[in-house]
């Protein structure tokens, strides 16, 4: 292998990082979509069908005026939120009963990330007519997001590809409450460095069709952005900060997708990506050669305003090898340029059986991991097997 293509490590950035904080991530999904009025074909790559007062009409993607206001209000009402961006803040009615028996309600400011509703925002997106944003959830609640949000929207005719205009943005937190989510800067810097090093490969990995969105939607960061953990909104990885504290990371790489299973696999990949960067951060910060940066920057600039045709990226294999332990932890793999489910080998089936036996005997997760590690099984595979059989 050409030494210039090998990722290095700057040990002067080594920090104490509690990797356990990055094992159970919460993610808020941003579903961008258009409504396909025919309900059988996707809108064209340049225009879409919206429902106007006089029936279906063609409107440009970026035309907010062409979006059906009535439909937007209907979606917001269904999910129990007010239409418009709110940054996770909203109002709810608080009932007050006076001593004389009178009752009345007052609006109380609340954090929608901590409310029961899965959806916290519904608004007109800049590149597609509609966007629905969920509050942060962990993997245990993916099934709820599928049935209550994704499938309902699909039932309304939502197209989440929109001819390559829709993205599948995901905001990751360490806790469902942003006040309790505090990212280590070196972990975020390693995420940015890895993305700068494997930008083209991660674009390819995030595509859901034969073409992928132009790079303008997910800008390649400079080294200065890495140093500052920049929160520029359109960066491929954007930080969310409050009072100087990083509470969330928005990943803007993946394309919009109409396949829920693929959405889940993509999300698991990025969870594995984050966990891997946390592990690396105990030893330093990622470095790579100038020639790699030149190649990645050239790819970014060449596709800034044009869609990207599917292509083969050999370096994905290199990335997959580096991430193997964390990919196994989340039960996914990279094969033929796509994220796919991890295929259990003979050892995997044996491990599942070993875990099941101990679960039936009433053993706790910590005891199961300790005992099976003593038998020579890989730690990440044990944890993944425990998750698969529902051990907490």
Image (cartoon, grey):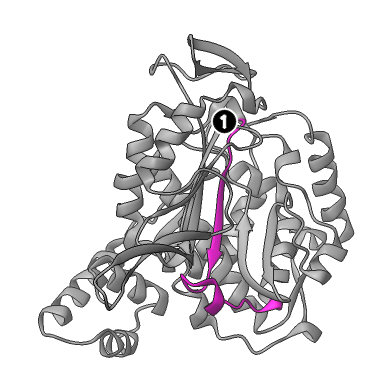
Residue at image location 57% in from the left, 28% down from the top: 210
Residue 194 makes an appearance in the image: yes
Image position of 278 (left or right of 268): right
Residue at image location 39% in from the left, 41% down from the top: 77
The vertical placement of 384 against 146, above or below, is below
The vertical placement of 184 against 164, above or below, is below
Image position of 343 (left or right of 131): left
Q: Residue furthest front?
A: 100
Residue 314 makes an appearance in the image: no
Quadrant assignment for the N terminus: bottom right
Q: Determine if the magenta segment contains residue 145.
A: no
Q: Which residue is under mark 1?
A: 129
Q: As rendered, which of 175 and 368 lies closer to the eye? A: 175
Q: Position of residue 230 (x, y in %)?
A: 78, 64
Q: Determine if the magenta segment contains residue 182.
A: yes
Q: As rendered, which of 118 and 39 lies closer to the eye? A: 118
Quadrant assignment for the C terminus: bottom left
Q: Position of residue 11 (x, y in %)?
A: 77, 84
- Residue 279: name its quadrant: bottom right
Magenta-colored span: 165-186
Residue at image location 71% in from the left, 41% down from the top: 217
Q: Position of residue 297 (x, y in %)?
A: 84, 47
Q: Residues within 10 Å of mark 1 (few under 14, many from 20)?
A: many
- Residue 242: name its quadrant: bottom right
The vertical placement of 356 against 124, above or below, is below
């Amino acid at each position: 292998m050409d030494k210039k293509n090998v990722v290095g490590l700057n040990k002067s950035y080594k920090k104490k990082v509690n990797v356990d904080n990055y094992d159970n991530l919460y993610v808020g999904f941003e579903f961008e979509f258009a409504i396909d009025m025919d309900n059988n074909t996707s809108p064209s790559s340049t225009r879409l069908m919206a429902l106007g007062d006089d029936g279906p009409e063609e409107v440009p993607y970026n035309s907010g005026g062409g979006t059906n206001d009535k439909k937007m209000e209907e979606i917001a009402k269904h999910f129990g939120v007010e239409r418009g961006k709110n940054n996770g803040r909203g109002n709810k009615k608080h009932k007050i009963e006076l001593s004389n028996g009178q009752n009345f309600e007052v609006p109380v400011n609340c954090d929608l990330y901590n409310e029961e509703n899965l959806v916290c925002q519904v608004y007109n997106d800049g590149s597609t007519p509609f966007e629905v944003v969920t509050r942060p959830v962990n993997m245990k609640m993916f099934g709820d997001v599928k049935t209550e949000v994704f499938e309902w929207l699909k039932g309304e005719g939502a197209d989440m590809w929109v001819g390559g205009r829709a993205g599948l943005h995901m905001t990751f937190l360490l806790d469902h409450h942003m006040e309790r989510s505090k990212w280590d800067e070196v972990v975020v810097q390693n995420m940015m460095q890895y993305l700068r090093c494997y930008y083209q490969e991660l674009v390819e990995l995030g595509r859901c069709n034969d073409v992928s969105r132009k790079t303008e939607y997910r800008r390649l960061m400079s080294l200065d952005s890495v140093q500052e953990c920049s929160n520029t909104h359109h960066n491929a990885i954007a930080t969310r900060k409050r009072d100087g504290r990083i509470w969330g990371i928005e990943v803007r790489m993946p394309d919009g997708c109409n396949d829920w299973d693929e959405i889940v696999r993509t999300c698991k990949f990025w969870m594995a990506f984050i966990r891997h960067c946390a592990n690396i951060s105990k030893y330093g910060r990622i470095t790579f050669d100038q020639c790699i940066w030149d190649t990645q920057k050239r790819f970014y600039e060449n596709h800034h305003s044009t869609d990207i045709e599917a292509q083969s990226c050999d370096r994905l294999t290199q990335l997959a090898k580096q991430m193997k332990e964390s990919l196994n932890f989340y039960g996914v793999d990279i094969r033929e340029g796509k994220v796919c489910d991890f295929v259990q080998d003979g050892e995997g089936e044996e491990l599942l059986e070993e875990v099941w036996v101990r679960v039936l005997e009433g053993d706790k997760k910590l005891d199961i991991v300790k005992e099976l590690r003593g038998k020579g099984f890989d730690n990440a595979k044990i944890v993944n097997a425990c998750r698969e059989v529902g051990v907490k």
